Image (spheres, rainbow, N blue to C red):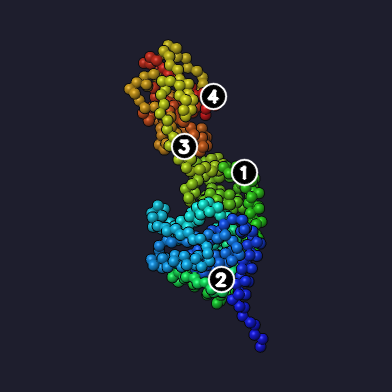
C-alpha cells in the first residue's frame, strides 16, 4: 500500500495563497494600486482572507463591526480582532452599532437585515475615507451553495440563484473557490487562531438550518450534492450571461428612457412579457406578482403600483406604464402657491389678469383658457391658491347647478396620470373657481349683479 505524504504547513500556506492570487487575477478582483477594506469578524474565513491578502502584499485595512448582540462574546470577538491585526501589522477600524435603534427606525426589518444594512453602509464610508478599491469579504464555497438554496426556496430567478458572485459592485470575494475545511487548514498553517460564533450552532436562522441539518443530510443521502450545487451555479452563470444580453436588448427596444413602457406592445410582441417586464422593473424593487398584475391591467387606465421600498410609483394609462420617483410625486402633490388674482400671477404658472367695468364685458370664444370672475370675489380678504388635485375635490362647472368630482372631469378628458398630477387648480378659500384650460366654475360667474369683472388668461405655453 502506497502512503501519500501529508502536505506540510508551509506547503498548505503557499498553495492557498497561490490559488488566491490566481483567482484574484483571473477575475480582476484587486490591484496593487489602492488599499483594500477587509471585513473582519474574527471567524476562520475572515481571518484567512486578511492573512492571505496581507501575505500577498495588498494594503489591507481591517473593519470589524460590533453589534453587541451576544454580550461578552461580542467583546471577545472584538479583542480577538485587535490581537490578530497587531500580529499581522494591519490597521483595524471598529464600529459599535445599536441594532435595536435601527430597527425602531425601520419597523419590520429583521435583526439579520438590520446588521447587514448597518455593516455595508459603514463599509461604503470606509471606501470613500480610505480611498480603497474594494471591500473584501470571506465568503467561500459552502456560503455560495447555501445562498443558492435559500434563494431557490424563495422562488428566485437566474440572478438570485447566482447572486453570490466574485464581484458585486465594490464587494469582492477572493475565497469563493475554497471550502471551509481548506480555510481552517490555512489559518492553522499560518499559526493563527479564529473564534467561533456560538449562534452558528442555533437553528433559529434559515441559513444555519441549511448548514447544520439540510446539507449534511443531502451529503449523506446524495454524496457529492454540495459539489453538484456549485456546478449548477456555474452552468446558470453561463446561461445568465446570455439571458442578460437578451434582456438588455429588449430593454433598449421597449424601455429605452427608463420612464415609460408600451405594455400593450410588449404583451402582444413578447410571449414572455411578464418575465421581461420583471427584469426591467426589478432594479426598482417591484415584485413578479406586481408585474403580472401590470400585464393584466395593460388595457385599462388608473392602476397604480408602489415599489416595495416605497421609492417608485408605476402608473398605467391607456396601455402605457409610466414610472416615477415617489418622492417627486409627493413634492408635486404638496405644491401650493398663495396668489393674488387682483394682478398678474407669475408663479407657478403665468396668468395675465385684467379688471374692467362690467359694461366692457365681451365674452370670447377661448374656452377654459380664460376665466371671467365677478370682482366681488376679491372682497373680504379671501385666500387664493394655485394647487394640484386632491382626492375628493369637487367643482360646480359653469352652467351647472350640481358639483362634479374633478377626477371625473380628468377621466372624461382622458388625462394621463402625469397630466392629472401637473394640472393646476385655482381656489378661493379652498373652493375651486377655475381649472385652467380644462373647466370654468359657476362660482363668482359674471351676472346681473356684477359691477366689475376680472379676466384671467393662461399665457401660451404655460400648460
**Residue matched to label 1:** 256
Say if 122 sits above or below 184 in the image: above
Secondary element at image label 1? loop
Q: In this view, does 266 lie to the left or right of 124?
A: right
Mark closest to the chain's N terminus, 2 or 1: 2
Q: In which quarter of the image is residue 335?
A: top left
Q: What label does residue 332 carry, if any?
A: 3
Marks 2, 1: nearer the viewer: 2
Residue density around tag 4, few if under 14, some if 14–19, many if 20 or more, within 10 Å: few
Q: How many numbered circles are shown?
A: 4
The residue positioned farthest toward the bottom in the image shown: 1
Say if 432 sits above or below 159 in the image: above
What residue is rendered at 64% in x and 45% in y? 253
Mark closest to the chain's N terminus, 3 or 2: 2
Q: Distance between the residues labelled 3 and 2?
A: 55 Å
Q: In this view, does 245 lie to the left or right of 197?
A: right
Q: Distance between the residues labelled 2 and 4?
A: 72 Å
Marks 3, 2: nearer the viewer: 2
What residue is rendered at 64% in x and 58% in y? 28
Q: Position of residue 47 (x, y in %)?
A: 52, 67
Q: Quadrant of residue 221?
A: bottom right
Mark closest to the chain's N terminus, 3 or 4: 3
Secondary element at image label 3? helix
Q: Where is residue 146 in the image (x, y as percent from the top left)?
A: 54, 66
Secondary element at image label 2? helix
Q: Are marks 1 and 4 in contact (CB under 8 Å)?
A: no
**Residue matched to label 4:** 460
**Residue matched to label 2:** 183
Q: Do the residues labelled 1 and 3 touch (CB within 8 Å)?
A: no
Residue density around tag 1, few if under 14, some if 14–19, many if 20 or more, within 10 Å: few
Amino acid at each position: 500500500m502506497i502512503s501519500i505524504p501529508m502536505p506540510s504547513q508551509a506547503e498548505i500556506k503557499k498553495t492557498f495563497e497561490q490559488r488566491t492570487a490566481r483567482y484574484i487575477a483571473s477575475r480582476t478582483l484587486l490591484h496593487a494600486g489602492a488599499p483594500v477594506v477587509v471585513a473582519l469578524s474574527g471567524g476562520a474565513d475572515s481571518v484567512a482572507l486578511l492573512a492571505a491578502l496581507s501575505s500577498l502584499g495588498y494594503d489591507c485595512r481591517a473593519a470589524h463591526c460590533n453589534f453587541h448582540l451576544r454580550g461578552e462574546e461580542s467583546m471577545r470577538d472584538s479583542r480577538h480582532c485587535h490581537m490578530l491585526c497587531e500580529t499581522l501589522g494591519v490597521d483595524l477600524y471598529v464600529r459599535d452599532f445599536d441594532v435595536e435603534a435601527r430597527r425602531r427606525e425601520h419597523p419590520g426589518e429583521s435583526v439579520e437585515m438590520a446588521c447587514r444594512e448597518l455593516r455595508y453602509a459603514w463599509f461604503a464610508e470606509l471606501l470613500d475615507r480610505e480611498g480603497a478599491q474594494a471591500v473584501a469579504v470571506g465568503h467561500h464555497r459552502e456560503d455560495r451553495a447555501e445562498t443558492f438554496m435559500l434563494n431557490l426556496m424563495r422562488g428566485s430567478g437566474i440572478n438570485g440563484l447566482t447572486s453570490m458572485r466574485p464581484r458585486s459592485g465594490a464587494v469582492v470575494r477572493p475565497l469563493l473557490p475554497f471550502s471551509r475545511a481548506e480555510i481552517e487548514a490555512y489559518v492553522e498553517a499560518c499559526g493563527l487562531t479564529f473564534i467561533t460564533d456560538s449562534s452558528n450552532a442555533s437553528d433559529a436562522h434559515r441559513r444555519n438550518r441549511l448548514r447544520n441539518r439540510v446539507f449534511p443530510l443531502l451529503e449523506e443521502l446524495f454524496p457529492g450534492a454540495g459539489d453538484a450545487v456549485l456546478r449548477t451555479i456555474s452552468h446558470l452563470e453561463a446561461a445568465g450571461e446570455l439571458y442578460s444580453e437578451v434582456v438588455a436588448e429588449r430593454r433598449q427596444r421597449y424601455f429605452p428612457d427608463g420612464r415609460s413602457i408600451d405594455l400593450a406592445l410588449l404583451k402582444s410582441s413578447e410571449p414572455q412579457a411578464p418575465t421581461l417586464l420583471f427584469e426591467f422593473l426589478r432594479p426598482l424593487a417591484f415584485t413578479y406578482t406586481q408585474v403580472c398584475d401590470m400585464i393584466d391591467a395593460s388595457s385599462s387606465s388608473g392602476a397604480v403600483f408602489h415599489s416595495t421600498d416605497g421609492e417608485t410609483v408605476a402608473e398605467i394609462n391607456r396601455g402605457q406604464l409610466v414610472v416615477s420617483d415617489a418622492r417627486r410625486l409627493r413634492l408635486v402633490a404638496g405644491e401650493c402657491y398663495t396668489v393674488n388674482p387682483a394682478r398678474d400671477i407669475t408663479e407657478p404658472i403665468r396668468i395675465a389678469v385684467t379688471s374692467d367695468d362690467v359694461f366692457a364685458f365681451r365674452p370670447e370664444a377661448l374656452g377654459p383658457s380664460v376665466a371671467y370672475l365677478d370682482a366681488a370675489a376679491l372682497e373680504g380678504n379671501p385666500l387664493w391658491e394655485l394647487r394640484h388635485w386632491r382626492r375628493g375635490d369637487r367643482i360646480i362647472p359653469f352652467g351647472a347647478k350640481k358639483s362634479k368630482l374633478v377626477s371625473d372631469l380628468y377621466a372624461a378628458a382622458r388625462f394621463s396620470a402625469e397630466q392629472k398630477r401637473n394640472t393646476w387648480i385655482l381656489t378661493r378659500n379652498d373652493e375651486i373657481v377655475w381649472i385652467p384650460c380644462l373647466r370654468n366654475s359657476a362660482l363668482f360667474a359674471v351676472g346681473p349683479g356684477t359691477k366689475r369683472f376680472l379676466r384671467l388668461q393662461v399665457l401660451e405655453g404655460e400648460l
